[in-house]
Image (cartoon, rainbow, N blue to C red):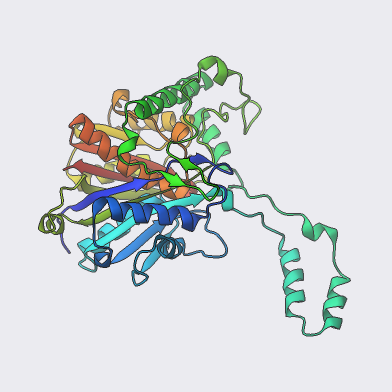
């Protein structure tokens, strides 16, 4: 098992757009194909040298659940490249990169593509098990008489779909409900959450204005002839007055609103990975390296659903051989402003005693609240954003923290080349 660092040569992401808007006619495979093609084009890698592709997705389409493979077909890259699709909820993209990195270190492959995609626009409504059985019985009927006999048992209720939703099977609570409860436990108020969300929008807007995101966001041509160049949910004109007028979404007395939570989003991201020695042999100057990766999980019946990263951070720091104070940048996934602020309180608490959080180091170009959160693509987005931020700041270490459903937390530490 090699202990050398895994180099991140380059990568791209699509603009992240609100679900059921400009990417509505593009499937997950279409969006994934865009970033695979563009990553290969920008890095100049010979696609025949790519050994494997790992992609993350949470809401995989029924017609092609191995989205990694379908995206490869869409990309036009060699169909001989094996592909794997991963679901670790919102941490899927990070786990995809960690999976490719592990295969490289194990000597199983030399070069791999990792990333993720989400097309919330493509998620379909589900029907009840009773309705499914009914239609399957009709499909299996061998004669017209059998079909007509079965059709006579039809109930109008069979056509009532179950709207798509995101709930924990164990608790029955949505992510938003769990985040609202987490904010209460850590005493994070509404005003504080709105202030954080507003600041994130302002930072993301400034990032687009100064050209930061153009370094790793590619243009996407849609089937209806539009060319999408920017994230669509970043609001430069937001204000505390506007945010304050919104009502809580999950509880009447709650603090989470549509403005201080990440929106449902379509988008994709990808990065090219290889060993440090391979990069040198091929003449590449990497963006940076994966220094360490760690995951943790909690009992969601006794602890907050989204607290997992706080348990993973000490593991990642230990594996990287650095301390909390060595970090120059902290990228925290903004599922909800309340979740981010509660995580920061936990990091600084006597219970976890990880360290003091310098807010100037946190998400300097905004996070998932303004940028968007296509579940499977967020990990790749954060890797690219962190490395380009470290380069712009001329700093060394960046930590990425992602909370995920099921009480899972994933943390990756990157080092600038």
| Residue at screen point 24% across, 62% down | 46
Quarter of the figure that contains the N terminus: bottom left
Residue 42 left/right relative to 321: right
**In x, y percent, where is residue 34?**
41, 53
Work out whether residue 81 or residue 155 is closer to the camera in this orientation and state it.
Answer: 81
Work out whether residue 230 or residue 136 is closer to the camera in this orientation and state it.
Answer: 230
**In x, y percent, where is residue 29?**
47, 58
Residue furthest to the front: 225
**In x, y percent, where is residue 389?**
26, 34
Quarter of the figure that contains the C terminus: top left
| Residue at screen point 59% across, 53% down | 123
| Residue at screen point 57% across, 63% down | 62
| Residue at screen point 62% across, 34% down | 250
Residue 178 left/right relative to 57: right
Q: How many marks?
A: 0
**In x, y percent, where is residue 339?**
46, 33
Tell me which corner region of the image, top left, top right, bottom left or bottom right, holds residue 63.
bottom right
Residue furthest to the top: 241
Asked whether residue 407 appears in the rendered view, the answer is: no
Residue 241 left/right relative to 85: right
Q: Is residue 31 above or below residue 198?
A: below
Residue furthest to the bottom: 142
Q: Is residue 117 above or below residue 15?
A: below
Q: Is residue 40 above or below residue 140?
A: above
Asked whether residue 144 appears in the rendered view, the answer is: yes
Work out whether residue 186 or residue 115 is closer to the camera in this orientation and state it.
Answer: 115
């Amino acid at each position: 098992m090699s202990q050398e660092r895994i180099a991140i040569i380059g990568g791209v992401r699509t603009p992240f757009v609100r679900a059921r808007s400009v990417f509505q006619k593009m499937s997950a495979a279409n969006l994934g194909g865009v970033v695979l093609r563009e990553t290969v084009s920008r890095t100049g890698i010979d696609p025949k040298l790519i050994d494997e592709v790992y992609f993350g997705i949470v809401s995989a389409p029924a017609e092609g659940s191995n989205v990694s493979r379908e995206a490869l077909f869409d990309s036009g890259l060699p169909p001989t490249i094996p592909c794997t699709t991963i679901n670790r909820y919102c941490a899927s993209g990070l786990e995809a990169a960690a999976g490719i990195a592990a295969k490289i270190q194990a000597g199983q492959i030399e070069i791999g593509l990792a990333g993720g995609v989400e097309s919330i626009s493509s998620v379909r409504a589900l029907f009840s098990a009773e309705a499914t059985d009914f239609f399957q019985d009709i499909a299996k009927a061998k004669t017209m008489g059998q079909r007509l006999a079965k059709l006579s048992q039809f109930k109008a209720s069979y056509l009532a779909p179950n709207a798509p939703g995101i709930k924990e099977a164990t608790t029955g609570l949505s992510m938003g409900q769990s985040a609202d409860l987490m904010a209460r436990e850590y005493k994070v108020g509404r005003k504080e959450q709105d202030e954080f969300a507003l600041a994130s929008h302002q930072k993301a807007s400034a990032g687009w204005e100064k050209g930061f995101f153009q370094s790793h966001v590619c243009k996407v041509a849609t089937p209806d002839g539009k060319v999408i160049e920017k994230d669509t949910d970043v609001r430069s004109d937001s204000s505390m007055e506007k945010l304050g007028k919104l009502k809580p979404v999950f509880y009447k007395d709650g603090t989470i609103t549509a403005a201080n939570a990440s929106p449902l989003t379509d988008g994709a991201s990808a990065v090219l990975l290889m060993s440090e020695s391979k990069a040198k042999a091929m003449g590449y100057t990497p963006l940076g390296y994966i220094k360490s990766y760690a995951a943790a999980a909690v009992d969601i019946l006794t602890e907050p659903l989204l607290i997992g990263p706080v348990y993973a951070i000490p593991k990642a720091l230990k594996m990287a051989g650095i301390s909390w104070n060595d970090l120059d940048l902290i990228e925290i996934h903004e599922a909800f402003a309340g979740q981010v602020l509660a995580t920061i309180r936990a990091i600084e608490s006597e219970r976890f005693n990880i360290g003091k959080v310098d807010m100037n180091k946190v998400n300097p170009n905004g996070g998932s609240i303004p940028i968007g959160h296509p579940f499977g693509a967020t990990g790749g987005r954060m890797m690219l954003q962190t490395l380009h931020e470290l380069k712009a700041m001329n700093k060394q270490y960046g930590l990425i923290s992602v909370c995920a459903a099921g009480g899972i937390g994933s943390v990756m530490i990157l080092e600038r080349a």
